[in-house]
Amino acid sequence: AELTQVLEEKMNVKPPSNVSQNSELLVARYNIDFQQGPLKETNEIYDVGIAGRGFFGIQNVDGSTVFTRDGSFTTNDQGQLVNGQGLFVLDQSGQPIRTPNGVSELTIGADGRMFANDVEFSQLMLVDFEQNDPYPLGKVGGNLFEITDPNAQPIPLKATRGVSTIKQGFLELANVNVVHEMVNMIQTLRNFQGYQKTIQALD
């Protein structure tokens, strides 16, 4: 989400009845920016970054599938692939991924296929959505998102337009342009201050 949109939402106030609302100052919602951020090399074997569009599938605590671009994964005591919250990472068929016992070498291909000692054993779920401006997704906590449009369906990435690849040993960083957001934040604060003075003068 853009920082200015969040600020405008937090500063949303109701003006007196004799003051018309300025739609540029009162914003009741904000859109989430899913554009790719820069990828940083970590050299961790379970870290995966998406170069391009797409989302990984995660099993939420209620059993539903939620989505994320955060590929900071690891394994639990049972060898299951999990995210930072301990939730299961899903394969193409929507099942939790379990790494084989006795793995000495694990690789993840550009298409999400997973190999243990050169033997393929699973493939990461990687999907996108036909509707993407905005995406039909709402935040549920952390870096997890759920489908908010009942008509929206995740599409396997190979069936979507464009090319995306998975990079093992990389993580995606925030896509925020700090300078741009600071300029927008200053302008938003100035707009709010002027609006507040108008309300105080008419009270």
Image: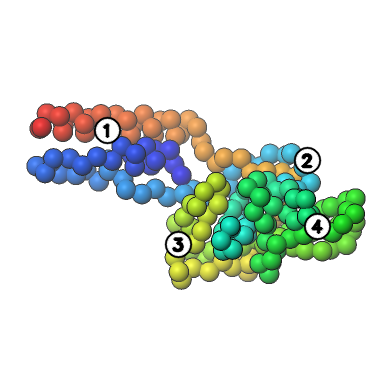
Q: Secondary structure at mark 1?
A: helix
State if disc 3 and disc 1 touch (CB < 8 Å). Answer: no
Q: CA distance from mark 2 to mark 3?
A: 35 Å
Name the residue located 57 percent from the left edge and 40 percent from the top edge: 174
Where does label 3 land, which residue?
Answer: 148
Q: Which of pointers 1 and 4 indicates the residue nearer the eye? A: 4
Q: Amino acid at mark 1?
A: Phe
Where does label 1 land, which residue?
Answer: 192
Q: CA distance from mark 2 to mark 4?
A: 19 Å
- Residue 110 visible within the image: no
Q: CA distance from mark 1 to mark 3?
A: 31 Å
- Residue 76 visible within the image: yes
The answer to whether residue 64 is above or below residue 108 is below
Q: Residues within 10 Å of mark 2 (few under 14, many from 20)?
A: few
- Which of the marked residues, 4 or 3, is nearer the chain's N terminus? 4
Q: Amino acid at mark 4?
A: Thr
Where does label 2 land, which residue?
Answer: 43
- Which of the marked residues, 1 or 3, is nearer the chain's N terminus? 3
Q: CA distance from mark 4 to mark 3?
A: 32 Å
Q: Nearer the viewer, residue 161 or 199?
A: 199
Instruction: Say which quarter of the image contains residue 109.
Output: bottom right
Q: State left or right for residue 35 relative to residue 76.
A: left
Where does label 4 land, which residue?
Answer: 99
